[in-house]
Image (spheres, grey):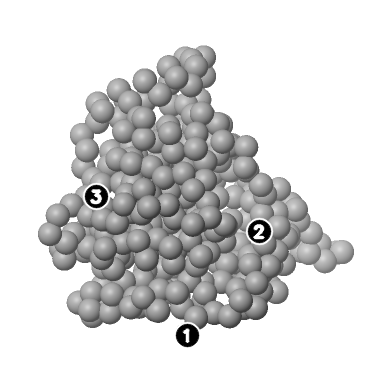
Amino acid sequence: MRLSKKDEALLKVDFSRINQAKAVFDDIYIQDDPRSYFSTLGDLDYMITDVAEPVIRQILSAKASVTESKPVVLDVGCSYGINAAVHRFPLTFGGLRHRYARREIKAVSSEELMQLDRNFYASWPDHGLARFIGLDVSAPAVRYATRVGLLDQGIVADLESQPLSAEDACIIKPADVILSTGCIGYVTEKTFGKLLDATEKKPWIISFVLRMFPYDSLEKTFAQRGLVTEKLGGVTFIQRRFRDAEEFENSLATLAAAHIDSTGLESEGLFHADLILSRPEADARVASLEDIVTVASGRGRPIAPRYVHVESDDGLQVTLEP
């Protein structure tokens, strides 16, 4: 059963309200190259790309066993193609961050950097299990990712407010897997519905979703198109530290309002995401998500001081604690 326009409006307002709890990083996604992206997010111990990669590889391996050719992954919210980089090459977000922090790299123009990066990525053996195409609202980010060879093709579109063009639909058509590692909440069932309607097969959908964002509307959209949805139980995946005390407190308040217990997770100063997989029922019957995936969630990785609550004579106080 499709959502009514009233329900869609309520969901839109809800996502907008939830996003108000988060810090805004719009500026880092509209640069001609990823130096600001790595500098800003790296300073917050951003790690979802690295902790998600082994899981994505396991799921892609399972998908490849039922796909006749190398799977095509559509990375939604691809930004500068980082998911493709860490999947295809023996690289990490942390390692790339150090590369872009070098004095020599900081000194070159964006055009020079794109040529350097094209040569850099071409020098590594490609051990990826899939080909990558990307979708993002940022034209500079998609341009970079395609020019340096991380994405085969890239689409610049805001499908929350715009229709999918015929040209872009042709690019999406062969997708076997749709991947998102942080865009849910900014991207809703509106975008995913348009993507699914454009694919010639029923793709697997891999989503790493911050726990503050409800997934019900997307799950309903997928079910309408013959996909069943599983969430990996007993584990979450760290995205990054909270930027400041305001983001920390607002995020915990948002979780509490949704009756989500943050104890031992977000209360420790870190955003946590769930892993959710949607796919055709016949594929799900072959092996459950728990059968496919073993994980390392990011716990135990070295992290800079983060915002936490501590008890004081005046009650709970926000402080920085290593």
Left or right, residue 88 beside residue 67 = right
Identify the mark at residue 1; answer none if there is no mark.
1
Identify residue type, mark 1: Met
Given this view, does label 2 or label 1 mark the residue nearer the observer? Answer: 1
x%, y% of residue 202? 28, 68
- Quadrant of the rendered image containing residue 115: top left
Question: Going 66% across and 58% down the picture, which residue do you hit?
Answer: 19
Residue assigned mark 2: 19
Q: Which mark is first along the chain, 3 or 1?
A: 1
* Mark seen at residue 130: 3
Is label 3 in a helix, a strand or a loop?
loop
* Front-lying residue, 36 or 269: 36
* Place of residue 256 in the rendered image (x, y in percent of width and height, measured from the top left): 68, 73
Which mark is in front, 1 or 3? 1
* Location of residue 181 by image quarter: bottom left
Check if mark 1's residue and mark 3's residue have beta carbons within 8 Å.
no
The answer to whether one can see residue 252 in this image is no
Q: Residues within 10 Å of mark 3 (few under 14, many from 20)?
A: many
Is disc 1 placed on a helix, strand or loop?
Answer: loop
Position of residue 306 measured from the top left corner of the image (x, y, whole percent): 64, 49
Q: Is residue 280 visible?
A: yes
- Classed neighbour count for the residue bearing mark 2: other residues with Cα under 10 Å, few (<14), some (14–19), many (≥20): some
Sequence-wise, which precedes: disc 2 or disc 3? 2
How many discs mark residues in the rendered view?
3
Residue shown at the point (44%, 67%) measured from the top left:
193
**Looking at the image, is 69 positioned above or below residue 119?**
below
Badge 3 amino acid: Ala
131 up-or-down from 100: above or below: below
